Amino acid sequence: MNGGESNEHLVDLVRTLAKLPRETEWVEFKLNKAVPEEIGEYVSALANSAALVDEACAYLVWGIDDSNHQILGTNFSPWTMRVGQEELESWIVRLLTPRLHLQFESVEVDGKTVVLLEIPRASNQPVQFKKQKYVRIGSYTKNLAEFPEKERALWRAFDRTPFEDAIAQDRLSVGEVLTLLDYPTYFRLVGTPVPSSPDLIIRVLESDGLTRASGAGDWAITNLGAILIARNLTDFSSVRRKSLRVILYRANSRAEAIREREGRKGYASEFEDLITYIRDFLPENEVIGQALRTTVSMYPELAIRELVANALIHQDFSVTGAGPLIEVFSDRLEITNPGLPIVSPDRFLDAPPRSRNERLASLMRRMGICEERGSGIDKVVFEVEFHQLPAPKFETILESTRASLFAPRPLGEMEKEDRIRACYLHACLLYVTGRYMTNSTLRGRFGIELRNSATASRLIREAVDAKVIAPFDANAAPKLMKYVPFWA
């Protein structure tokens, strides 16, 4: 076996696939034939067809006779096949758009070797191989462009099936579902007792969209169930690359990583452990904030919790091969999630909350993992100001969104960009709570003494010149001037 799945599970999977009808749009059987070009076309066709018939993934299987589905075994070895100087799997993935996470598996069934290629279903867009889209028509692979009605149906399937509702693994018994899911953590976090029987447990999970009953009496686990409470994310092909990684670096660059942890469980099951792991490796800082003097973690824990939860909730699950990432440097903490934000980063603090993963967000709020709707970034900015840290930074990096917290730094050592950002976010925080920024409030934010009020005035001028804030009343007397964000 060359993958992460158990031998028993693979044997059961092979036997289940062999019992399918002859013409199946999401499974293709081969004996020994393995032409790289054809495999790439099969991947595209099977991924797209799996989405059309609402299957969690598709399979290309070597060692089963296509005519009668007898298990005969194969001599095909994908791990030794190369295309030019490139390994077969790497070559196929490179030519796919979007790139999928593919995994070949080998298993012995009745003394015969069977090789499986598990293929995630298409999501958000059709899968292409060498810029061509394919689909299965019965048991045949065809160019999708020749079947416009199939392509229209495929796009409709993308529109009607949010990521959370798609199937992560199906054809499961009640016992198998409860083995794969960390249901005790679910009930603990939502604050209800564990029901008295497996059937009642799975029905409650179904009511929150974590599982789904099938017409044949079997059960399926949805992506929502897998991503939140999987005992092991690698059991689910659709989310196994979405685990939360934490990397600790020695200095302020990525030149030398000294520690790394990759989450193995679902987000809800492992959230507290990961927050503790981050906190334990952060240096401490003595702060004087709003007349409070104490020794605390370098960054406010509430800010970390909220930004990590936001990264999980707002990620774009259609971005393959990437998951949320937390990087701890000597001078900053960066939290990155795949996908561009729905709301512009400079409006995170005031814009009405929107999420591309509404069910995930709703359930994580019920579990107490993140703050109430719309209050998260407000609390991050408040915590940063309370501890008189440099302002957080929200930005987009290629196809990702990043939030950064910065280590303590005196005002005199801050760059102009940092000062302007701090002034802007201070004005935003006050405005959304029905107040206005003044020279006095900005002095409090930076810990500037009254006798140095000219320093605060200079910071305000920088922000006005940068057009991120504006006077509330341009005709007011200088001592009565109030300021609002540019969008107010």
Image (cartoon, rainbow, N blue to C red):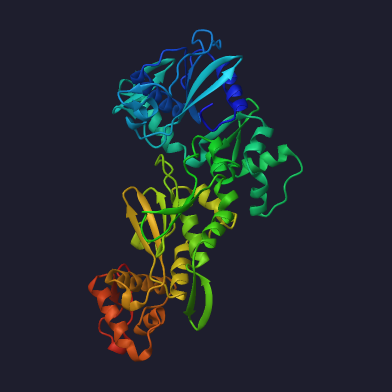
Work out whether residue 485 can be spotted: no
Residue at point 61%, 42% (across, down): 231
Name the spot of residue 146 as percent of width and height, x first. 31, 20
User: For the N terminus, which image quadrant?
Assistant: top right
Residue at point 64%, 53% (across, down): 189
Residue closer to the observer: 357 or 297: 297
Name the spot of residue 271 as percent of width and height, x first. 56, 53
Quadrant assignment, res 421: bottom left
Classify residue 48 as left or right of residue 131.
Answer: right
Residue at point 51%, 42% (across, down): 164
Residue extending furthest toward the right: 196
Residue extending furthest toward the top: 67
Classify residue 325 as left or right of residue 20.
Answer: left
Classify residue 440 as left or right of residue 167.
Answer: left
Position of residue 447 relative to residue 142, above or below, is below
Work out whether residue 382 can be spotted: yes
Q: How many marks?
A: 0
Residue closer to the observer: 128 or 207: 128
Residue extending furthest toward the bottom: 451
Position of residue 85 relative to residue 442, above or below, is above
Residue at point 60%, 22% (across, down): 11
User: For the C terminus, which image quadrant?
Assistant: bottom left
Name the spot of residue 177 as percent of width and height, x first. 64, 35
Position of residue 122 relative to residue 475, above or below, is above
Classify residue 97 as left or right of residue 378.
Answer: left
Name the spot of residue 459 as percent of width and height, x first. 29, 78
